[in-house]
Image: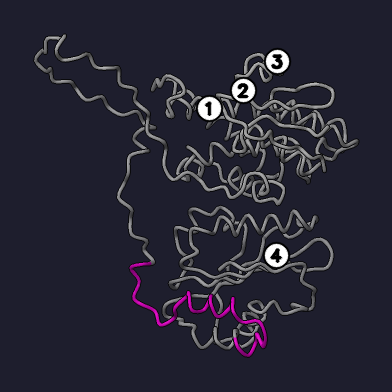
Amino acid sequence: MALILHSTNNNKNASKALIAGEYTGVKVELAKDFQMGVSNNTPEFLKMNPIGKVPVLETPDGPVFESNAIARYVTKLKPNNPLFGSSLIEYAQIEQWNDFSATEVDANIGRWLYPRLGYRVYIPAAEEAAVAALKRALGALNTHLACNTYLVGHLITLADIIMGCNLSIGFRMIMTKSFTKEFPHVERYFWTVVNQPNFCKILGEVKQAESIPAVQSKKPAQPEKSKVKEEPKKEVKKEEPSPVEEEAAPKPKAKNPLDLLPPSKMILDDWKRLYSNTKTNFREVAVKGFWDMYDPEGYSLWFCDYKYNDENTVSFVTLNKVGGFLQRMDLVRKYAFGKMLIVGSEAPFKVQGLWLFRGKEIPKFVMEEVYDMELYEWKEVDINDEAQKERVSQMIEDHEPFEGEALLDAKCFK
């Protein structure tokens, strides 16, 4: 008998078991034609879970409910599963973070979000308390992640699956960039986790909320006019919005200072198109084309070198670190092009980059918003120095060997 998960396909709690199944190699199938509010009220479903909550996993040995318990069951089906860590202390720490995720993160996201969606009574004071508690939890998580790629050890574990799913509803529905920027390590961690292939299969593309949902007001039914005598209308004092409500109000979008620069003869999209479409004779076509297009009055070139290369001892962790950096650079995509090289055939790996920015300096908003920037040494390219110019050309074309060493990988931001 296959494992049948009774839930809709967009339930973040169901996603925990589905992602655990992808990592474990266990097939978990969603129940066909499941309808929330209908399927979970049938006698057959209530026999599996008397209170009708989803998800429920149907197994050959009987049903299991509660999403974390279901995810544990799926994970346990593989003996010595690395999702449970490699030692007793790692297993205990994984369970520690699972509890933290449920009680400190998921619960407080729900207390903030669900009243705004109309599922619970909205009380401004309760919302304030929920937001404060969530910030406290994310602050603790941020401190832990400042020196850890994942929650436990150097690999994805069940703790990351449960935390990633619980955070996903917050990032998607209510935790805007203006809210999460206070927790840069949580941001890096979340985007690293949800962009892992096994997460992408289940969660799809995750986009961050652009605004906080407005409170759903429920108006009481109005009595018929013929039966009720109308009274003179009284002037009602307008209530002040709560601090969180104010954040949801639309604000005029400020003009990006880079849009105010004098026009440049270099059209960035033309260069990106040339780079992407050149498949052969790259040096003669794309690299030569770059130097023909380059406008030192409208753009600047920068080398960057990671300050802590001695820490790059695990290849996939190093690659994830660079991938997370490029994701966080998305805010400057319209104004930049970048190449990041991971250099070396064995650890520790060196991370070196080349960036083209609009303007004669690194944009201030990038330095302020992308915390990774301070992890690199930045040096402006002197294009009058032929050696530096040749280094730029080699980085654009992923020349190998690069400065005498093999390339582990090369990533492009365009």
Q: Position of residue 307 (x, y in %)?
A: 67, 60
Q: Nearer the viewer, residue 163 or 365?
A: 163
User: Mark on residue 47?
Assistant: 3
Q: Name the N-terminal-most of marks 3 and 2.
A: 2
**Residue under the point 66% across and 14% down:** 50
Question: Which residue is labeled 4 in the image?
Answer: 351
Q: Name the N-terminal-most of marks 4 and 2.
A: 2
User: Mark on residue 40?
Assistant: 2
Give neighbour class at mark 4: few <14, some 14-19, many 20+ (Cα, 10 Å): many
**Amino acid carrying mark 3 in the image:** Lys
Q: Name the N-terminal-most of marks 3 and 4.
A: 3
| Label 1 SS | helix
| In the depicted structure, whether residue 152 falls above or below residue 284 | above
Q: Please identify, in this view, whether the residue under mark 1 or under mark 4 is nearer the observer.
A: 1
- Residue furthest bottom in the image: 284
**How far is disc 2 from disc 1 in space, using C-alphas?**
21 Å
Question: Which residue is labeled 1 in the image?
Answer: 110
**How far is disc 4 from disc 2 in space, using C-alphas?**
51 Å
| Label 2 SS | helix
Q: Please identify, in this view, whether the residue under mark 3 or under mark 4 is nearer the observer.
A: 3
Residue 128 appears in the picture as rendered: no
2 and 1 marks in contact (CB < 8 Å): no
Q: Position of residue 377 (x, y in %)?
A: 61, 64
Residue 60 lies in quadrant: top right
Residue 281 as seen in the image, left or right of residue 233: right
Q: Which residues are magenta?
A: 259-285
